[in-house]
Image (spheres, rainbow, N blue to C red):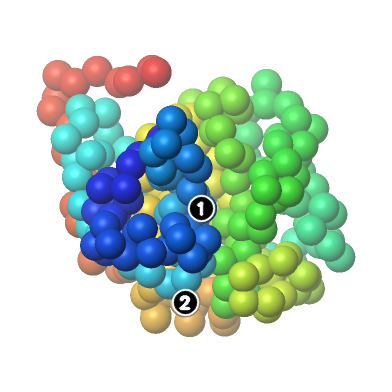
Amino acid sequence: MEIGVKEAAGLLDMSEKTIYRWVREQILPVYRINDQYRFNRSELLEWATSRRIKVSPEIFQEAQHSKTPLPTLVDALKVGGIFYRVGGGDKPSVLQSIVDILNLPEEVDRGFLYQVLMARESLGSTGIGDGIAIPHVRNPVVLHVSKPSMTLCFLEQTINFGAIDGQPVGTLFMLISPTVRAHLHMLSRLSFILQNKDFKTALKEQASREDLMKMLSLAEAALPALNSTPPEASPDHN
């Protein structure tokens, strides 16, 4: 998940000069390892999404070259589901409410999931602006789930989530993934789709499940094609 300046510039569709300037200005989330700047791919995607920076479509090419199929967001949302009027008056209680309703295998420790979600929030809010947050665990592999899911939750009341724009959050996308690769895949596609005006309008209106699925499908159809899997390809269990 760690990438260098050149890869970060490619992901954000910016020049390396701009990346170095943002590093100097302490705008980008960055680490310095052995006198080299390193970036966490997931953190960069979150950062770009929160600032409405469209990442380069090249981010999808890695998935297309792999033999392991990745789900559409529509498929992931069908697994995770859409929930309305989710309770909670603050971030901890809202996250607990969401953890309680998630469609998860019985063997997943929901108490542990809640703890790692809160630990992730302590590093910085996953509120990306416009009343939306994308809570997720920092290392998705620890959950041992078999398939990616995306759960969409509309809160009964908006709450202070520490979002970058200061707006209260009322809409949350919870990403659950079996691998880092699948997590990056969903996060990158979601960052693109949240730029779609029609889908954003459907979210603000808290449209019906049927309408939300329809709008998500239309928005996702405009993204670079998903990888196709040869019939003989075997699943990747890493």
Q: Is residue 52 left or right of residue 67?
A: right
Q: Amino acid at mark 1?
A: Pro
- Residue 115's spot in the image, x, y percent? 77, 37
Q: Is residue 40 above or below residue 201?
A: above
Looking at the image, which residue is at 25% across and 39% down?
63
> As rendered, which of 28 and 228 lies closer to the eye?
28
Q: Is residue 99 above or below residue 181?
A: below
Looking at the image, which residue is at 19% across and 21% down?
233
Secondary structure, mark 1, is: loop
The residues tagged by marks 2 and 1 sit, at their Cα atoms, a distance apart of: 26 Å
Circle 2 residue: 200
- Residue 46's spot in the image, x, y percent? 49, 56
- Dot 2 or dot 1: first in sequence order is 1
Q: Is residue 196 left or right of residue 229?
A: right
Q: Which mark is residue 29?
A: 1
Looking at the image, which residue is at 54% across and 33% down?
140
Q: Which mark is residue 118?
A: none
Q: Amino acid at mark 2?
A: Lys
Q: Is residue 127 left or right of residue 2?
A: right
Secondary structure, mark 2, is: helix
Mark 2 burial class by Cα count in 10 Å: few <14, some 14-19, many 20+: some
> As rendered, which of 127 and 108 lies closer to the eye?
127
Residue 220 visible (yes or no) = no
Residue 141 visible (yes or no) = yes
Mark 1 burial class by Cα count in 10 Å: few <14, some 14-19, many 20+: some
Q: Nearer the viewer, mark 2 or mark 1?
A: 1
Give the position of the C terminus as an image quadrant: top left
- Residue 83's spot in the image, x, y percent? 65, 59
